[in-house]
Image (spheres, rainbow, N blue to C red):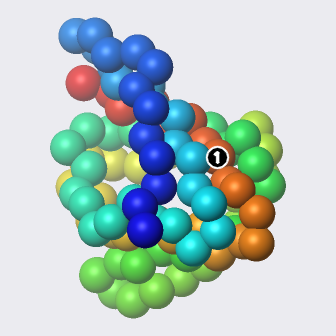
């Protein structure tokens, strides 16, 4: 089952997407085309399936983090509740 992305803004500079994940939903495997910032709207655990293996990431509401283009992974909601975050891709 796939998470639901909703693009809020897209222009020549950024793409801003809200991601909503029901328990167990995932983004499917993808490779980031742009550097990005993630702003969690929920506190909880996301499971990351990466080239090097699987790991859990603990996210806290409002505690942003960055990623770089070329990052390859699948992101899975490991919680028993909906998880949400905003992803801001820098073109």
- Residue at image point 26% right, 38% down: 34
- In the rendered image, residue 63, in percent from the top left (x then y), is placed at 73, 43
Residue at far bottom of view: 53
Q: Is residue 63 above or below residue 73?
A: above
Q: Quadrant of the N terminus?
A: bottom left
For the point 46% across and 20% down, which residue is it? 8
* The C terminus lies in quadrant: top left
Instruction: Name the foreground residue: 46 vs 90.
Output: 46
How many marks on residues?
1
Q: Quadrant of residue 40 in the image?
A: top right
SS label for mark 1: strand
As drawn, 7 above or below 42: above
Q: Position of residue 18 (x, y in %)?
A: 52, 34
Q: Is residue 57 visible?
A: no
Asked whether 64 or 31 is in front, the reply is 31
Say which residue appears at 41% left-offset and 15% top-offset: 9
Query: Is residue 42 found left or right of 25 in the rendered image?
Result: right
Residue 66 in the image, given as x and y percentages of width and height: 49, 45
Horizontal side of residue 75 vs 29, given as left or right: right
Closer to us: 8 or 58: 8
Residue 27 rendering spot, x and y as whole percentages: 40, 60
Q: Is residue 54 above or below residue 87?
A: below
Give 51 or 18, whichever is nearer the viewer: 18
């Amino acid at each position: 089952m796939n998470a639901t992305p909703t693009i809020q803004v897209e222009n020549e500079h950024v793409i801003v997407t809200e991601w909503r994940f029901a328990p167990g939903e995932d983004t499917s495997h993808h490779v980031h085309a742009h550097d990005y910032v993630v702003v969690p709207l929920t506190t909880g655990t996301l499971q990351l399936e990466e080239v090097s293996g699987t790991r859990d990431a603990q996210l806290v509401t409002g505690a942003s983090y960055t990623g770089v283009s070329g990052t390859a992974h699948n992101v899975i909601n490991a919680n028993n509740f909906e998880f949400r975050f905003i992803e801001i891709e820098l073109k």
